[in-house]
Image (cartoon, rainbow, N blue to C red):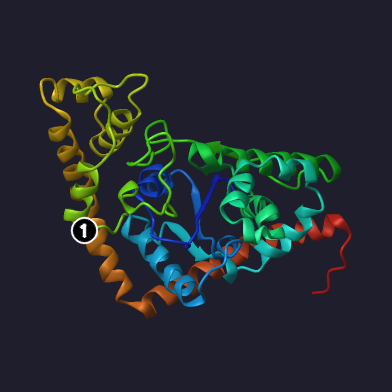
Amino acid sequence: MLGEQKICFSGVQPSGNLTIGNYLGAIRNFSTFSDAYKCFYCVVDEHAITVRQVPADLRRRTYETLALYMACGLDPEKNTLYVQSHVPAHAELSWILNCYTMFGELSRMTQFKDKSTKHADNVNAGLFTYPVLMAADILLYQTDVVPVGIDQKQHVELARNIAERFNQLFPDTFTVPEPMIPQNGKKIMSLADPTKKMSKSDENQNAIVYILDDRDTIIRKFRRAVTDSDTVVRFAEGKDGINNLMTIYSCFTEKSMEEIEREFAGKGYGDFKLAVGEVCADALAPVQARYKELLADKAGLEAQMKKGAEEAAYYARKTLAKVQKKLGFVQVR
């Protein structure tokens, strides 16, 4: 911990348009931690380059992701908002932790297997070791809690393993972090294939709802969402499509599954799909308006990048110096 206040850390890659899965499972919840925790929210641009990026697109999306953070309610006065590559300690600690991470641990990471299949022509070392960089991101700030979707829990578990291993050799170096998984909206699924997670890299655009989609597009995508041959809006095993739509509706309305079932009793899937599209579009409208304002002020975003990086670097350097000293690195001041 930094002082008496507990620490919260999370990050989002600027590698594509963010989806409602990113919003409901992560970003929307970030602001709720601001009063109880010292929060570090990072645009993790170094993670993005495990997959080939167009430099101009990566640069643009870095600005866009920071603007989205703020548009989704993250107050820069209450949270440290910054870009990962602006704080060199992330990469420095990552190398050190690579030397305390086992090859077998990384071989078992499910996302490495998935990305290796999707990018078979570019299975680079960074793709294999990026969970160690993620561990460095977390451990650098002596993080207590990491708000993540259920699919990212494995990465936090690896960070815990690395921290515990390092602490056994060099006691009291790192805080061992805990994953914080939201109970509602744990995992938002594809609208085209509700057995798979909604992914911003999906080639089928009808499978994804982006935070920045306009109202008509949002409603059209929900109208086309895959359901089943039943006509009753109810949450049940084998109804993956409807279950996913009910989860999304519940996230936006805070209604329970039982309340949703009562609300749409006697109504068909068409009415329900329209309702889901409308509550989603209504919720995202103020986010989109604020985002446009922020993105129009490039100088303001750059000022925030600089301020956030200075705040983050202050804390990051303290942990890195502690680690280096314990390892026996010569420190010259």
Residue 87 on image: x %, y %: 61, 68
The spot of residue 39 in percent (x, y) is 49, 52
Horizontally, residue 114 falls left or right of residue 173, namely left
Image coordinates of residue 270 in percent, x first then y, are: 14, 34
Label 1 neighbour load within 10 Å: few <14, some 14-19, many 20+: some
Q: Residue at x 86, y 43 (%)?
A: 169
Residue, disc 1: 214
Q: In which quarter of the image is residue 309?
A: bottom right
Q: Quadrant of the C terminus?
A: bottom right
Q: Is residue 220 left or right of residue 316?
A: left
Q: In this view, does 59 lie above or below 147?
A: below
**Which amino acid is tagged 1?**
Asp
- Furthest-bottom residue in view? 299
Is residue 47 among the parts visible in the rendering?
yes
In front: 271, or 312?
Answer: 271
Residue at the image position 36 percent from the left and 51 percent from the top: 204
Residue 210 vs residue 286, the one in the foreground: 210
Q: Is residue 163 visible?
A: no
Of 28 and 106, nearer the camera is: 106
Q: Is residue 330 left or right of residue 19?
A: right
Residue 183 falls left or right of residue 148: left
Look at 26% across and 70% down and name the residue there.
293
